[in-house]
Image: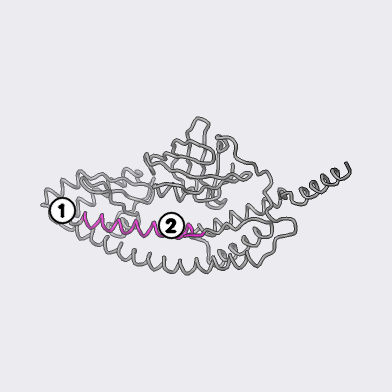
């Protein structure tokens, strides 16, 4: 009997020693801030290199001290993905505009005017989309329109987007009548080729910087020491996701200075996306959840009916997404952040 009691005592003592530590709310806050700041450092293009390096090193030390695993991405960081997307977009625009120029060059005056009259021009924030019958949409920036065509596209001013589109269409007609429209389009093409060259140079420079930042993170993480008893510690309020509606509610990402993005997941399977960071529109879509897998359709203007599939993890008041499959780049880059429950 005594031997049995002694054995139970040993087992209980061993369980107590090996029990996983739970961080208190203050420690959890520090860990979540470290994660959020690291995500910002790997995402925010406007952050200075010195600030980025400081945050990368400090976040690594904080995570290691409180027994948290490394969260440094193994592949490209969001900044690289963003720049790669810019590079591909610029390449596509060159192809589209070259085809547009070639198409116009071989048409008679009457055919050119007919083509211009059937064009649909839409102003979307700082992007101008020209829909040409029989061609893929041509995307132009407001800066390009201003510098090459002399039209100052300012959303909401002088009649708003509709008037801006009319002004641009009239400018195209004027240039077609003077037989100079093709020349102006070719100027756009050359400008984009120069932009492509500069973007490629920036991509190469960024690759070298990322290697430095990752090395600094790894050195800081490996050089720090986990506090006694904190190895494998879990965050306060961490609970496994057991219900499919755990994602319900409003989540935000952003900064006090710049504004926020908001995703609201309703109980009826609908979501609402609000762009308060760029004074953008409010859009809606559909979603479904199975376990920790989220399926999205929409927002319609950005993604149409393209389905996005993500794995999500909720830690306390924070949620992170990891892409499984998504061909909609704008949705993919928007979700690639640490989201906080509102």
Residue closer to the observer: 318 or 90? 318
What is the secondary structure assignment of the residue under circle 1?
A: helix
Q: Which residue is mark 2?
A: 82
Lateral position of residue 148 relative to residue 295, left or right: left
Residue 306 tag number: none
Lateral position of residue 43 relative to residue 231, left or right: left
Could you tell me residue 278's position as x and y percent?
46, 49
Q: Label 2 vs label 1: CA separation?
A: 40 Å
What is the secondary structure assignment of the residue under circle 2?
A: helix
Q: In which quadrant is the C terminus drawn?
A: top right
Lateral position of residue 111 relative to residue 320, left or right: left
Q: Which residue is mark 1?
A: 177
Residue, x 43% and y 57% (percent of image)?
82
Most distant residue in the right direction: 2
Task: Give above or below for 13 relative to 147.
Answer: above
Task: Give above or below for 219 relative to 188.
Answer: below
Q: Callout 1: few (<14), some (14-19), or many (20+) C-alpha neighbours within 10 Å?
A: some
Q: In which quadrant is the N terminus drawn?
A: top right
Magenta residues, start to end: 74-100
Residue closer to the observer: 180 or 338? 338
Residue, x 32% and y 50% (percent of image)?
128
Task: Give above or below for 70 relative to 9.
Answer: below
Which of the 4 image quarters holds residue 118?
Answer: top left
């Amino acid at each position: 009997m005594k031997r049995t009691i002694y054995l139970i005592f040993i087992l209980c003592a061993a369980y107590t020693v090996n029990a996983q530590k739970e961080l208190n709310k203050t420690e959890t806050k520090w860990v979540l801030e470290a994660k959020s700041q690291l995500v910002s450092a790997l995402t925010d293009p406007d952050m200075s290199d010195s600030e980025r390096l400081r945050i990368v090193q400090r976040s690594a030390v904080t995570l290691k001290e409180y027994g948290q695993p490394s969260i440094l991405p193994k592949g490209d960081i969001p900044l690289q993905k963003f720049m790669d997307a810019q590079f591909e977009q610029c390449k596509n625009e060159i192809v589209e505009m070259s085809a547009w120029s070639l198409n116009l060059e071989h048409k008679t005056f009457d055919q050119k005017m007919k083509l211009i009259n059937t064009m649909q021009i839409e102003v979307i924030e700082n992007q101008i989309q020209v829909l040409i019958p029989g061609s893929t949409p041509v995307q132009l920036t407001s800066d390009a329109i201003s510098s090459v065509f002399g039209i100052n596209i300012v959303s909401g001013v002088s009649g708003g987007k509709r008037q801006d589109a009319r002004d641009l269409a009239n400018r195209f007609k004027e240039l077609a009548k003077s037989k100079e429209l093709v020349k102006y389009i070719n100027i756009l093409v050359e400008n984009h080729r120069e932009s492509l060259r500069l973007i490629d140079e920036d991509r190469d420079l960024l690759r070298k910087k990322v290697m430095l930042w990752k090395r600094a993170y790894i050195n800081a993480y490996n050089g720090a020491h986990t506090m006694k008893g904190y190895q494998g510690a879990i965050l306060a309020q961490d609970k496994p996701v057991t219900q499919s509606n755990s994602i319900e509610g409003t989540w935000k990402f952003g900064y006090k200075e710049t504004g926020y993005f908001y995703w609201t997941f309703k109980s009826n399977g609908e979501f609402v996306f609000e762009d308060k960071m760029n004074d953008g529109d409010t859009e809606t879509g559909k979603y479904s959840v199975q376990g920790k897998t989220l399926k999205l359709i929409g927002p319609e203007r950005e993604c149409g009916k393209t389905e996005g599939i993500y794995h999500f993890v909720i830690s306390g008041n924070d949620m992170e997404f990891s892409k499984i499959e998504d061909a909609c780049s704008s949705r993919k880059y928007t979700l690639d952040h640490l989201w906080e429950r509102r």
